[in-house]
Image (cartoon, helix red, strand yellow):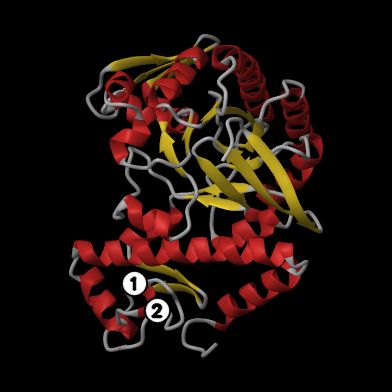
Amino acid sequence: MTDTFQFKLLATDGKARRGEVSMPRGTIRTPAFMPVGTVGTVKAMYLDQVRELGADIILGNTYHLMLRPGPERVARLGGLHELIRWPWPILTDSGGFQVMSLSGLRKLDEKGVTFKSHVDGALHHMSPERSIEIQGLLDSDIQMQLDECVALPASPKEIERAMEMSLRWAERCKAAFGDQPGKAMFGIVQGGDIPHLRERSAAALAGLDLKGYAIGGLAVGEPQEVMLDMISTTLPHLPTGKPRYLMGVGTPDDILKSVARGIDMFDCVMPTRSGRHGLAFTRRGRINLRNARHAEDMRPLDEESNCPAARDYSRAYLHHLIRANESLGGMLLTWNNLAYYQDLMAGIRKAIEEGRFADFMAETQENWARGDLAPL
């Protein structure tokens, strides 16, 4: 641990990077996957379990936490770490993505965004300064600038307008964040699917000399090839000695291909949301436990897994729980999925250290392609 925020590159293999983010509340091994704890809970999981699976950091959401229980209340209760019993690093996103999804309930201008709560319809205003203030009240370790995220496809004019607005907001967020020892504010590259806008956004943010940089506005409807092209376009314009975070991504395949291009940090609701809907991620690929073929299959999801949910419960029982809408089904599959994601990240880190990331990636994809009925 350290009293300051530091990022160190430990190894590279091609463009893939193995590093560490060090900060007062702990060390984040990169490439890292951050489980999403939107409202202070990783759905269907105890946070002790999340830690035991290998998570060094979780994500909280500014928009949702400002609505309930409210940032001032969280501060009075000792901050988010104390409230939820997670003493390790927390990253809070700015709420920009959620505001995008409320397009019918919001009004956006240079000052910020005014929106109606999806909870009770109350009117709220979030400026760049208020977003940083809320994240400070939550006492998160990594705070994200407020940005405007545009769903794709969109017109070039709209994408450019939002990108330029986000850059101006980044400057205001940096000023509001000030000097917070041991903490970091990350800027967010925007620019949709237009390469020269991505380059312009990345170069301008790099000029602000922030402690880390995120790529936002992807995985919002565009094909995977477009997402990967935008990553490759953006990264050469960001500092090599600072962490790079791809927001809201993604599938295990997205993660592998993004690491290959130089991404260090990820978050996504996919492992938890999929688990609640009966979908398991495994070394053998995706397994839909709703399918009738699992009804009498006594095999576990993965007999070699260290996770009890994957190793000790039959597919027949998991199928029964999911079809019966029993809460335990979603809990077990979420547990399995987060275990798989953290095992994947551990495998990625080890492969980069050993200079065999390309082989690891090919072997992993080959096992997915063989399917869950084929022996490994």
Q: Residues within 10 Å of mark 2 (few under 14, many from 20)?
A: many
Q: Nearer the viewer, residue 101 or 132?
A: 132
The C terminus lies in which quarter of the figure? bottom right
Residue 308 placement (x, y as % from top left): 34, 73
65 relative to 268, above or below: above
Labels 1 & 2 near each other (Cβ < 8 A): yes
Q: Nearer the viewer, residue 345 or 187?
A: 345
Q: Nearer the viewer, residue 86 or 197?
A: 86
Residue that appears at 52% across and 45% down: 248
Instruction: Let me know if residue 177 appears in the view.
Output: yes
250 relative to 362, above or below: above
Instruction: Let me know if residue 220 appears in the view.
Output: no
Residue 34, numbered label = none
Residue 309, numbered label = 1
Amino acid under disc 1: Ala
168 relative to 227, above or below: above
Instruction: List the residue tagged with mark 2.
Output: 301
Horizontal side, residue 369 vs residue 310: left or right = right
Residue that appears at 72% across and 57% down: 260
Residue 98 placement (x, y as % from top left): 43, 32
Residue that appears at 37% across and 35% down: 81
Q: Nearer the viewer, mark 1 or mark 2?
A: 1
Q: Residues within 10 Å of mark 1 (few under 14, many from 20)?
A: many
The N terminus lies in which quarter of the figure? top right
Disc 1 element: helix
Residue 6 placement (x, y as % from top left): 66, 36
Amino acid under disc 2: Leu
Q: Which mark sits nearer the N-terminus, 1 or 2?
A: 2
Rounded to the nearest angstrom, the CA distance separating label 1 from label 2 is: 8 Å
Horizontal side, residue 105 vs residue 257: left or right = left
